[in-house]
Image (cartoon, rainbow, N blue to C red):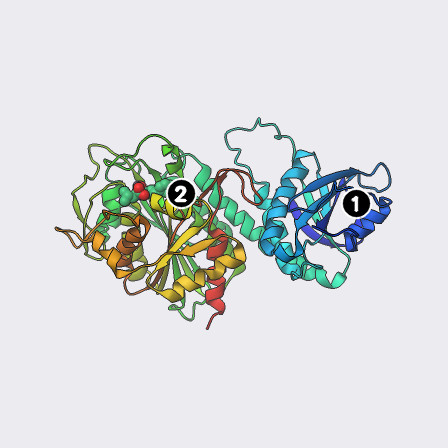
Amino acid sequence: MVTVKAIAGNIVEADVDTIVVNLFEGVTTPSGGTGAVDKALDGAISSLIADGEIKGKVSEVTRIHTFGKLTAKRVVVLGLGKVDQFSVDIVRMVSGDLARYLRRIGAKRAVTLAHGAGIGGLAPDVSGQAIAEGAILGLYRFRNYRKQDDEADKELEELHVVEQEQSKLDALNAGISVGQTLAESTIISRNLVNEPANVMTPIRMAEIAQEVASEVGLGYKALVREDMVQKGMGAILAVTAGSAQEPRLIILEYKGDPGHPDNNLALVGKGITFDTGGISIKPSANMWEMKGDMAGGASVIGAMRAIAILKPKLNVFGVVPAVENMPSGTAQRPGDIIRAMNGKSIEVDNTDAEGRLVLADAICYAKEDLGARRVVDIATLTGAMVTALGHVASGVMGKSQSMVDVLQASKATGEKMWQLPMFDEYREQIKSDWADVKNTGVRGAGSITAAFFISEFAEGADWAHLDIAGTFLSDKDRGHLVKGASGIPVRTLVKLAQDLATAK
Ligand code: BES
Ligand code: MN
Ligand code: ZN
């Protein structure tokens, strides 16, 4: 993995293969580090700007060969876009795009400036964090099964952020270190999602959670089928009934405020390791995407790792029901009536609405056995979410507006979220003729009726729900995202825990 680090010095003198400087759109006479490099290159950068070759658009890269004028073989000018549209999200994005570009052109050791820490107005730690997140996440590739791709032998080894002002160095490095923790934790989540379902079974997911727990010192425990029977988790048991894979309920525990056990938060993530739909089977086109139907659970495992390292002052539980949803002679049927851990009966109208079933028992467990006071669940829950918000934003719903509001944390992380309403009228749809509640609605607003179903099992806790069905995958390389699992919303969950720890 690339090493990101801030060092003091003059960027012109850097003894590396590639120097990266930056440029806002519309600037004709570069100043600061870019200006110094321009001077050393006898005005090459400013004359390329004058010629219109360099515009400074977001993620624009221009390569200039130095031919002995500098120790470095080449200079790359990176565009930051317009100053008035600049933000930390731009830094994360250009850093990801830049890192992949550097790898493609064969750079191994590069230096860059702290984007935005000058006229961009960002605090040095904020800039450093975004540079590290962008570079590490942007360079991520899932190569467990295919090592022979075009750039297999290319690796950007080192990206140093050169800062002339010694006083900013500590803050820069502190930000970089947080960014690295968050990026590495996001990568754990991405790997879990990208692994195929024949490998990433419930048992394998539990093993990885255990490895993460021992790496960073989290409590770990997993319930097996017999425990579920004993606790009356009829909803998880109904979903697993058709599968040959043994289910697990994974529990991770971080004790950040042991003196105040009630100062807690449970992150509950849907962990369907494959969703065929069950007897209400899905069409085969794009069914492969359902290997990632455990993305909510994967984000919880990733976030718990970062939380253990960054140590916010509150107690956090990670709860992941890891189950496979398959059709078979032992599978549950539409029309079956089951009972969740809290005693509520559920009419299973559609076996493909399985996520809300496993979440029901997992949330009951978090409240009743762990004593969770606040609950955020994260799930690839409804196709309707993709219809509503596409692949741009995750949906947020909840009965507790204060919990929904804390998810404003997403504004700092760039993981876009948007609230959908929980008007009482929508609840009508999940009324059952036979049971306390039915697992599907009939008409529109499928994401909201799903949230209403979950709310039946979240009573008594401050609860919010995140539907990541449209955001857990990225269809292309863009900034810190690469094709495949996005790792959303790991960074927001960590920020949420940090915000709750400091709010009073
Ligand atoms: N895992 C799916 C939802 C999903 C679809 C996630 C596409 C990501 C991409 C979920 O279990 C599901 O099948 N939901 C059904 C619910 C319906 C039966 C009420 C859906 O959305 O069609
Ligand atoms: Mn389903
Ligand atoms: Zn599902």
Q: Which amino acid type corresponds to the residue marked 2 in the rendered image? A: Met
Q: Name the residue under label 1.
A: 50
Q: Which mark is residue 205?
A: 2
Instruction: Tell which circle, 2 or 1, labels the residue nearer the N-terminal end.
Output: 1
Q: Residue 323, can we see it?
A: no
The percent position of residue 377, horizontal first and vertical second, equals 37, 54
Looking at the picture, tell me which residue is in the foreground, 418 or 321.
Answer: 418
In the image, farthest residue toward the top:
148
Q: Which amino acid type corresponds to the residue marked 1 in the rendered image? A: Ala
Q: Do the residues labelled 2 and 1 touch (CB within 8 Å)?
A: no
Looking at the picture, tell me which residue is in the foreground, 111 or 93.
Answer: 93
In the image, farthest residue toward the left:
434
Measured in 3D between alpha carbons, the distance from the residue under mark 2 to the one under mark 1, in whole angstroms, is: 55 Å
Q: In this view, does 70 lie to the left or right of 93?
A: right
Looking at the picture, tell me which residue is in the foreground, 228 or 6.
Answer: 6
Please identify the quarter of the rendering in which residue 150 is found.
top right
In the image, farthest residue toward the bottom:
504
In the image, farthest residue toward the front:
51
Identify the residue shown where x is 47% and y is 45%.
189
Q: Residue 159, can we see it?
A: yes
Identify the residue shown where x is 69% and y is 50%.
25
Give the class, few, some or many, for how many residues have Cα within 10 Å of label 1's Cα (few <14, many ≥20): few
Q: In this view, does 484 lie to the left or right of 331?
A: right
Q: As displayed, is residue 497 above or below residue 99?
A: below
Q: Considering the numbered disc 1 on the image, is that residue within a helix, a strand or a loop?
A: helix
Give the class, few, some or many, for how many residues have Cα within 10 Å of label 2's Cα (few <14, many ≥20): many
